[in-house]
């Protein structure tokens, strides 16, 4: 888990509570540079108490389209493969802050 990434995300406007929950879940699996995220969408849906895996898939697609996360590869798993993701820290740091006093658009 990257506490730095988690803290950055929780203070940014991501677009919806669902997207934010998914992104925070991914931050929990990420390395400090935002890489190494490969989690089951079915498990994510169950852990986040979402109605379906499709909800997770749709919102992840939106996060990829907006440049907040990127698909960087695939990893083998017992059901074939899972997609590996990376959180784009520069993009996240440029999202609007949830609090007026947060400094915009900078990351280490």
Image (cartoon, rainbow, N blue to C red):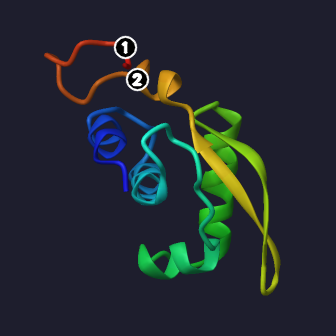
Q: Position of residue 78 (x, y in %)?
A: 78, 86
Q: What residue sits right under mark 2 in the picture?
A: 93
**33 left or right of 103 in image:** right
Q: Which mark is residue 58?
A: none
Dot 1 lies on which element?
loop
Q: Is residue 52 above or below residue 88?
A: below
At a point 75% along the width and 44% down the height, the residue shown is 72
The quarter of the rendered structure image containing the N terminus is bottom left
| Count of numbered circles on the image | 2
Q: CA distance from mark 1 to mark 2?
A: 6 Å
Q: Residue 12: image x %, image y %?
A: 33, 32
Residue occupying the far bottom of the picture: 78
On the image, which quarter does residue 102 sit in? top left
Query: Which residue in the structure is indicated by mark 1?
Result: 106
Do the CB atoms of the residues marked 1 and 2 lie less than 8 Å apart?
yes
Is 31 displayed left or right of 56 in the figure?
Answer: left
Classify 62 as above or below 95.
below
Q: Residue at x 42, y 73 (%)?
A: 48
Q: For mark 2, does the 10 Å Cα neighbourhood hold few (<14), some (14 to 19), or many (20 or more) residues? A: many
Furthest-right residue in this view: 80
Q: Residues within 10 Å of mark 1 (few under 14, many from 20)?
A: few
């Amino acid at each position: 888990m990257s506490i730095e990434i988690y803290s950055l995300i929780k203070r940014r406007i991501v677009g919806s509570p669902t997207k934010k929950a998914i992104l925070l879940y991914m931050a929990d699996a990420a390395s400090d540079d935002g890489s190494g995220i490969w989690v089951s969408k079915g498990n994510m849906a169950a852990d986040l108490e979402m109605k379906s895996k499709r909800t997770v898939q749709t919102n992840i697609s939106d996060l990829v389209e907006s440049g907040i996360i990127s698909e960087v590869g695939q990893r083998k798993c017992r059901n074939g493969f899972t997609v590996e993701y990376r959180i784009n820290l520069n993009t996240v740091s440029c999202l609007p802050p949830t609090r007026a006093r947060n400094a915009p658009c900078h990351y280490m």
